[in-house]
Amino acid sequence: MLRAGPTRDHAGMRPDDIHLEPQVSATNLSQNANELESDPQTEEHAIAAPPTRQYQALLLLTGFLMTFHVIGINSVYGIFQEFYTSKETNIVDGRGQDALISLVGTIGSGLTWSGSIFVNPLIARTDHVKVITFIGALIMSIGLFAASYSTKLWHLYLTQALLYGVGSSMYYFPIMSITPIYFDRHRGFAMGLILAGSGVGGLVIAPVLETLLSKYGIGWALRALGIWNFAIGLPVSMVLRHRPGFGARGRTRLNLRLVKNGTFIYQAFGAFFQAAGNIIPIYYLSSYCVGVLGYSRSTGSLLLAINSAVNSVSRISMGVLADRVGRQNTMIASVMLSAISVLALWYNAPRVQFITFVILYGVYAGGYNALLPTTITEIYGVQDYASVNGFIYFIRGLGSICGAPLAGLILGSHKRGSALLGTDLDKGTLRRRYNDVVLYSGMLLVGAGFCVAYVRWLHARARGGWSWKA
């Protein structure tokens, strides 16, 4: 039975997550009623009991802890990048090979996202999502632990890239795919809070990793990360469950109608460009500090931690802002401002300017990652969320894999250290190469900004009118 308006629980949440327009005409209400009568799955969504505030809070906590490790470890790969390419490296064929070493990290982080193409169908076809999450945390931890015994590049590709990437994807997507269904009006805040865990993870893991590296070496640093990840992943995996009443959980096969839609096409391009451009500052921040600015490796790790801390606060604040002024509006501003910060502040940056860039990029770059799941739900609805989200994140993974290694090819092989005497590149040449990397990253982000802005316009046209809040 249809009611005149959606009921709300004591937390102010609507019990259903079906996207409705703010103004619904009598004709549309009649059409919706007919659709509900003819679609048992939609009717099941309409009568689903609202989630309790206690479970919503528990879901936010587990999601925060998950992103703390998965995205937090991904975001500090620049520390591994700097170590594996340095003269102290344990990877004998990795010294000075930025492109090859960055490919290890981008395969790992790329599979974290691209794995959605097989993880999301698993989520939709099983009632035991806890098992998927648990297995993912286990495989991810095994990948880190096994990487501690690596001595050659191909060892890293098997462990810290493939094993880690497959496991992190299985750990990441069950929480990220199911959580938006438990929230509606405050969905932007909820996803921003969960993804803030990645910034806090980077803030904590960066100095911890640097300390472990300096005191105990790369082997024990990786083993400690693997054990720590599994210790947190075990209780986290026990929390997750499908929302009662959402038995079909949305389509996981991509509708061909959507593939041909301009909104979907430009959103996919935007996802690719943003992932490719965004990962470059994260991976090369530390090496720029050491190679160009002459900072110590510990200072580079500290700046990476500061970037993560600012990014964490930004993801929450942008989620709150998005709920007030529009999620797509906030995402467009985030991408454009992050592109401007790269081009204006990182290019040819001296020390003070670079520190300003580290902070401002942390502020601006968090919006896209925090708001992408909510805008997918907003544009395509709950029924197509699983399929669209899975494919868009698959595209993001491809962008991540392409971004940093190509930047490494632009940078070329070189030695580096706080004392640049005896290197095969003088400081001026190395700075010019980094400037080329900056231009590459900035233009990718500019392209992403235009794509998400065009998606905003296409979505408004499809809805039949412009609204300032979207």
Image (spheres, rainbow, N blue to C red):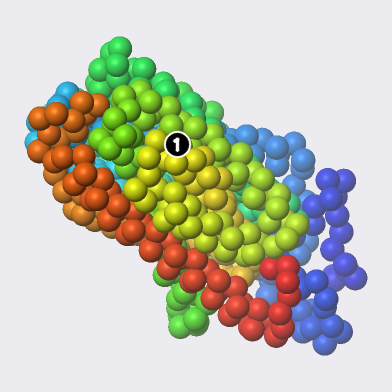
Question: Number of callouts in the render?
Answer: 1
Q: Which residue is at the front of the view, 421 or 169?
A: 421
Name the residue: 84% across, 63% down: 6
Q: Which residue is mark 1?
A: 352
Name the residue: 82% across, 87% down: 27
Q: Is residue 318 visible?
A: yes
In this rendering, position of residue 87 left or right of residue 80: left
Q: Residue furthest right?
A: 4
Q: Which residue is at the front of the view, 134 or 427?
A: 427
Vertical position of residue 143 compared to residue 335: above or below: above
Q: Which quarter of the rendering shows the C terminus?
A: bottom right
Name the residue: 40% across, 48% down: 346
Q: Which residue is at the front of the view, 246 or 375?
A: 375
In this rendering, position of residue 448 left or right of residue 380: left
x%, y% of residue 264? 49, 74
- The disc labelled 1 sits on which kind of residue? Val
In this rendering, position of residue 387 left or right of residue 280: right
Vertical position of residue 186 compared to residue 458: above or below: above
Q: Which quarter of the rendering shows the N terminus?
A: bottom right
x%, y% of residue 160? 27, 37
Quarter of the figure with residue 185:
bottom right
